[in-house]
Image (cartoon, rainbow, N blue to C red):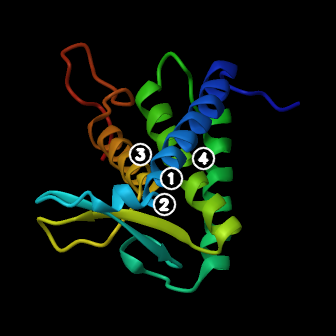
Amino acid sequence: MIKIKDTKAVIFYFLMSIIFLDFGNQIRKLSYFPSFENINNSVFQIVHLNNTGSAFNLFQNHTLFLSIFGIIAIIFAFIYVMFNLSFKKDKLVLFSITIFSGGTLGNLIERLHLGHVVDYIKLNFINFPVFNAFDIMICTGIFLYTIYVLFDNSDKVTDKNGNNQNNL
């Protein structure tokens, strides 16, 4: 029998992924309204760009590959949440994976439905590729998970004096 580590974590993962997916989708819709394309200031502007690649315009015209990669990433994230995370102990990891999954799912749905991802945020103060809310979620999730991995001390074994006993 399959044993799920923490049912609350799995439920949280599903619900929050849906919320982030909806949030990103609502923001994406702004790029379809001509009045929002008039937003142009020194920081950013709203544009409408159909992107057949991934972040930073990598893998242009490889929609099938990117779709399969997205599906695999979401499956691995779900399995990781289901069998490894506890809602009480692993909130940052759970939150970071959830944000990542919501963004990945949003881009995946656009890729499967439209054949491309709609990017619409263009930064005016730096030469940077156009991106969307789902991209922000993916990068934020990866950033938070990286912070967790770099600074998590829960696995360190210490002696009675507080000295690190892990073998490096």
Give the numbered dot on residue 68: none
Give the numbered dot on residue 77: 4
**Number of marks in picture:** 4
Left or right for 127, reference 144: left
Alpha carbon distance from label 3 to label 1: 22 Å
Mark 1 lies on a secondary structure that is helix
Q: Residues within 10 Å of mark 2 (few under 14, many from 20)?
A: some
Q: Residues within 10 Å of mark 3 (few under 14, many from 20)?
A: many
Q: Is residue 45 above or below residue 115?
A: above
Residue wearing tag 1: 29
Left or right for 63, reference 145: right
User: Which quadrant holds the N terminus?
Assistant: top right
Q: Earlier in the sequence, mark 4 or mark 2?
A: 2
| Residue type at tag 2 | Tyr
Give the numbered dot on residue 32: 2
Could you tell me if the residues under marks 2 and 1 are in contact, i.e. CB atoms within 8 Å? yes
| Residue type at tag 4 | Ala
